[in-house]
Amino acid sequence: MRGSCALSSNETRRSPENGTSCGARGGPGAVRQRGAMAARGVRAALGAVRPRGMGPGRAAGLRAASTFSDPGPEPAGPATAALYVHWPYCRKHCSYCSFNKYVVPAVDEAAVRACLVREAQTLLRLGHVRSITSVFFGGGTPSLASPHTIAAVLEAAAEVAHLPAGAEVTLEANPSSADPARLSGFRAAGINRLSLGVQSLDDAELRLLGRDHTAAEARMAVEAAQKLFPGRTSLDLIFGLPGQSHEAWARGLEAALGLCDDHLALYQLTLERGTALEARVRRGVLPEPPEELLAEMYLSARITLVAAGFHQYEVSNFARKVRRPHLEAPPPRAPTAGAAPPHPPLSYRAPAVPTTSPTGGPSSTWAWGRVSAGAGSGVHMGLCVHCALPALCCTAGAHGRFVPWGEGGRLREARVQTPHPDTWMREVRSCGHGTRRRAALSPLEQLQEVLALGLRTTEGVTQQRWGLFSPRLSLEAAFGASGEARELQERGWMRLDGRALRCTPAGLPVLDSLLPALLCQLRRRWDAAEEEDGGGRRPK
């Protein structure tokens, strides 16, 4: 029943807080991709190569071991995770946004804060997390939350796991809720990096997108942010709007370069069904941007940013190759109930993983690469492709990946949080968290996600990272012999060497068209290795 904590019969779980049985419907999680050109085909590609029955195997590139599906023992060292916290509320619906967000007359912030605190602590305990590498507040519009709520969540997380003083703590903000006083409060609460959803510096484009700020307000917000977060302010821009010319996009990018700090995220507009903008394009009121124009916009933007000293580290994300001295820590403030001590900002570096998205939440690579813990409605929790550690996500509607050691689990799970905030809060009060569906991921399913999301980065899927998920089937065994991957390498779109499998600069923009072939080849090599090893068993 919706709103309850009832699991299907084979997926009963226990609340780590009170020992009572509670849970959510079972079912596989789905990778959620957003914004960039290469993201379009990932979900379909993964769905097209769901694994068959599992079995043990040994082939070229395999070590003698128990079975492919053996999850192995619990890691002996301290569990490390990233934390994503979702604020699901917005002031208005943007015309292009299909994310899990809600526009309500009033928000009971005290109630939401209490549930975010409780779910964050519950998930950190379930994952046996001892150290938090980074925290990201996404949405929705998390800058609509009060600094007190941000501080309370950070303090709650620090009570359960170690939150180092140097941990990166990012907040997404809209220019309309990023005035200097509010930003100063966020800095005192522990935020040391800001991601501003500027989207455009053209008023006509902002109106088309349904944004609630003007270009002038965006400029003022950026200037205020850079004073409080120097070297730690990122800007989001959207291109490929209906009717937008290449010249208009180039002018907007140049304007942003004259305003931005050391990080930019460029997102191609996706016309999502169910949004006002998509409906206008479907009815012929607005023109659909030609694919050739979209490609030209993206490729020319890469050239412009490289010339300006930026390094592309992911499909949509660019950072300057600079380092800054360690920034001054936030000024001390009077302690308040539920407030976390201020965390000093990091010295600048290109972020290890993408951390922004057009309208809320971490970018898909961040959400699916390292094990993450998440709190809140509409959250996506998953793995960071860069380090393969847990990422926990809190709030309604989230999707995530982690091993629930606290429930006796030994397999990485796909988890989906209850989407509606009110229902999510009822479940958190009852069970400690609002997980609606959960399903154990097979080793092959985990590798498929590592591949699809790791290739979004210019670093690619490293030999070391692949080995964490596949100690028996090596990258060379999976993609080095004749097959689709070799053909893509010969065409200049992929590169496999002793360090990693990665896209070339020519291949990265068309990753969505390359993934289905790579995923199918991985499936065949995995199945062949299992058959050669004599059959096996699926994890139960």
Image (tube, rainbow, N blue to C red):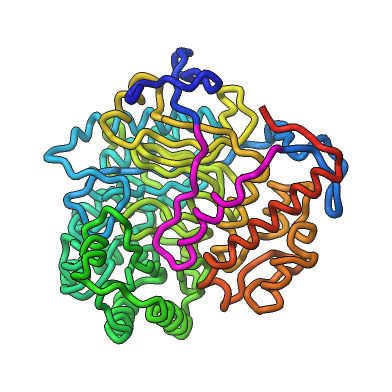
Magenta stretch: helix, strand or loop mostly: loop
Q: In the rendered view, tell whether residue 309 sits above or below residue 123.
A: below
In front: 401, or 136? 401
In the rendered image, residue 122, in percent from the top left (x then y), is placed at 45, 27
Region in magenta: 27-53
Visible residue check, residue 258:
no
In the rendered image, residue 26, in percent from the top left (x then y), is placed at 49, 29
In the rendered image, residue 206, in percent from the top left (x then y), is placed at 20, 68
Q: Is residue 188 magenta?
A: no
Residue at (28%, 30%) from the top-left corner? 337
Residue at (19%, 33%) from the top-left corner? 108
Question: Can you tell which quarter of the image residue 192 is in?
Answer: bottom left
Q: Which quadrant of the figure contains the C terminus? A: top right
In front: 389, or 276? 276
Q: Which quadrant of the figure contains the N terminus? A: top left
Left or right: where does residue 379 sit relative to residue 383? left
Residue at (28%, 83%) from the top-left corner? 245
> Which residue extends farthest left?
105
Q: Is residue 29 magenta?
A: yes
Number of numbered discs on residues: 0
Visible residue check, residue 44:
yes
In the rendered image, residue 231, in percent from the top left (x then y), is placed at 39, 67
